[in-house]
Amino acid sequence: MSAQSAAAEYATPNQAMALEQEGKLAEAETAWRAVIRNHPKDAGAIASLGVVLSKQQKYLEAASAYRKALSLDPRLPGIPLNLGLAEFKQGKFQAAIPPLQAALKENPNSAQVSILLGFSYYGAKQFTEAIKYLQPAAAADATNTELHQSLAESCLWSRDYVCASQEFQKILQQNPNSAAAHILMGEALDGLHQPEGAISEFQAALRVAPKDPKIHFGLGYLYWKSRQYDNADREFKNELVIDPKSAESLAYLGDIQMKQNHSDAALSYLQKAVQINDTIRLAYIDMGTILNEQERYKEAAIAFRRAVELDPTNPDAHYRLGRVYQAMGDTEESKKEFAKVRELHEKADEDALAPKMSPSGAPKP
């Protein structure tokens, strides 16, 4: 055994800390491991190993060391934050949340921990929880675009459209040429049932980034919702120039052609759409509708059955499928589908608030 190996084998905590302070992280790691071999229940030493591992960006090993240290001594100060950071750095946002909550309990006024917790909830797609932590932090820092962007998106995806539009407005004031902010602002305004404002935001995004994918589709969809079918048709076709495999654009072009009584053109678009992406329910509903009108009942039934598979809880496909079975003379299958329609409508009535209210307005038990 060399003198260096022997020194490592019998290293002391002071020697390990000195190596760490000198920036000799690999040697410090070796020294702390030697300390731990001699003192396997030393929570402080194990936590210190975690720190050295984190400094070397060995976050998986660091997290393991921090967890072991906390299992030996749950009161170790600062280690929950270190563990949360190690999990966060790995992109393990859900795993980062419990230790960061513990760190915030340890230090309730820590802005760093609050922001990390907010971003962890954001990364874990728990947007309502993310807002609780990101909103105060964003209010305290008007210039942090990333913070405001994450808060705005959390508001949008939790359907708090007022909050989302307010935050995107702040972002756009700082950077009017942010195509992403214009798009998300448009989505927020759409959620607030302001179609003209939503369309204006997507038009602004196109002026900034005319060749970015999905913008033409988003604008086309807003036109489609507003029944401006000629404008929608143009935008969906523009999207296909950028992305010839945009199945959604093909599906909505098919829907427009169907609405304009161009059945053959509609079927062509819809069939291309489902060849690229077989999960677009609208395409199967429209295909089934056209095929049913053309008395191609077997093909229509296949399309409607696929629509049912994609969303068994929506009664419209069950009803249409029942009508097709009826036209085919399949009485039993037709009855099953119509029974399913009734069941789904009854379920919707049960879930509504009004039937749960007594005449006095008090909720029933």
Image (cartoon, rainbow, N blue to C red):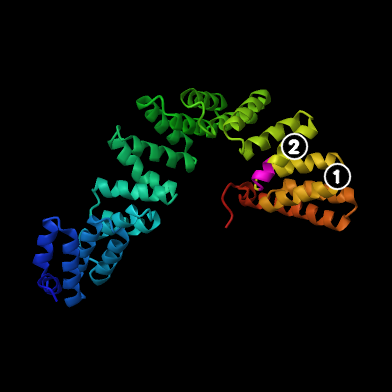
Element at label 2: helix
Q: Give the range drawn in magenta.
A: 273-278
Assess disc 1: are there few (<14), some (14-19) or many (≥20) residues with their C-alpha within 10 Å of its C-alpha. Answer: some
Q: Quadrant of the N terminus?
A: bottom left
Magenta-drawn stretch, dominant element (helix, strand or loop)? helix
Assess disc 2: are there few (<14), some (14-19) or many (≥20) residues with their C-alpha within 10 Å of its C-alpha. Answer: some
Q: Which residue is drawn at 76% across and 41% down?
A: 287
Q: Where is residue 309 in the image (x, y as percent from the top left)?
A: 69, 53
- Residue 146: tell me if it is visible: yes
Residue 75 sits above or below residue 57 on the image: below
Instruction: Check disc 2 and give the amino acid type.
Output: Ser
10 vs 136, left or right, is left
Residue 339 sits above or below residue 160 on the image: below
Q: Mark 2 points at which residue?
A: 268
Q: Mark 1 points at which residue?
A: 296
Q: Which mark is residue 333?
A: none
- Residue 312: tell me if it is visible: no
C-alpha span from label 2 to label 1: 16 Å
Closer-to-camera residue (295/57)? 57
Q: Quadrant of the C terminus?
A: bottom right
